Image: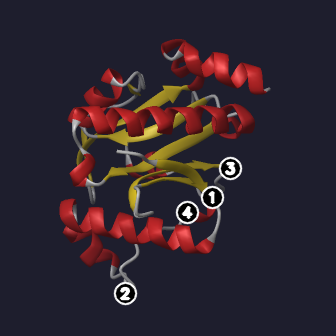
């Protein structure tokens, strides 16, 4: 399977990203969509205006995976605003959050997901370096936290497992950019050459 990975900057593809997110959330969290009362079958929230969006497109140019990186957010971050933990250790101007990491169910084999996550790491690491982001929140389910560690995205819980108001039981987590680089030296090598 050949994928095209891109940072989404145009309205047409951003609408496709939001429609894809709606589709995935309808499968896994339909109650959240009902509560949100979105009328156009696109899922977006108040953090999207402070985000950079990435997508994987399949051979027909359909979105098959998404992720966003929120940073410089004056309204805080989803994890910070929905979970209980001590966030005083993180400097606001060096902080971000990665969320809406969604993969279409037809591409969720270990092999294909790995290809997608490798691309996510590539784009996210570069953007974190570019924007001076030293640590990134994530609000992660136990199984997804384990999966990301297998894929060398070493998130660490910073609070206890807790019930999210919309998305079930999750750990508030942090990912250190420096540690992501140590776990993936090929990223440091690549982005070091591009600096």
Q: Mark 4 or mark 2, which is nearer the start of the sequence?
A: 2
Task: Look at the numbered discs 2 and 3 and tell me whether their residues touch, using CB distance below 8 Å.
Answer: no
Q: CA distance from mark 2 to mark 4?
A: 17 Å
Task: Look at the numbered discs 4 and 1 and tell me whether their residues touch, using CB distance below 8 Å.
Answer: yes
Which residue sits at x=65%, y=16%? 189
Q: Mark 1 or mark 3, which is nearer the start of the sequence?
A: 1
Residue carrying label 1: 50
- Where does the C terminus fall, quadrant-wise? top right
15 relative position to 43: left or right? right
Q: Secondary structure at mark 4?
A: helix
Q: Is residue 161 above or below residue 33?
A: above
Mark carried by residue 72:
3
144 relative position to 13: left or right? left
Q: Mark 3 or mark 2, which is nearer the start of the sequence?
A: 2
Q: Which residue occupies the foreground of this view, 78 or 55? A: 55
Task: Look at the numbered discs 3 and 1 and tell me whether their residues touch, using CB distance below 8 Å.
Answer: yes
Q: CA distance from mark 3 to mark 1?
A: 7 Å
Residue carrying label 4: 48
């Amino acid at each position: 399977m050949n994928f095209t990975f891109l940072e989404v900057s145009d309205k047409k593809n951003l609408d496709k990203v939001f429609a894809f997110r709606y589709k995935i959330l309808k499968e896994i969290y339909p109650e959240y969509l009902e509560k949100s009362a979105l009328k156009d079958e696109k899922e977006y929230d108040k953090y999207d205006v402070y985000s950079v969006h990435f997508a994987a497109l399949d051979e027909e140019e359909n979105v098959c995976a998404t992720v966003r990186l929120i940073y410089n957010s004056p309204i805080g971050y989803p994890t910070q605003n929905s979970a209980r933990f001590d966030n005083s250790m993180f400097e606001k101007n060096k902080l971000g959050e990665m969320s809406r990491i969604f993969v279409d169910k037809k591409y969720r084999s270990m092999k294909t997901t790995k290809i997608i996550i490798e691309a996510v790491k590539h784009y996210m690491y570069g953007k974190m370096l570019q924007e001076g982001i030293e640590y990134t929140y994530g609000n992660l389910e136990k199984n997804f936290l384990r999966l990301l560690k297998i894929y060398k995205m070493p998130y660490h819980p910073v609070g206890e497992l807790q019930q999210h108001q919309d998305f079930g039981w999750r750990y508030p987590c942090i990912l250190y950019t420096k540690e992501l680089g140590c776990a993936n030296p090929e990223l440091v090598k690549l982005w070091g050459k591009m600096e």
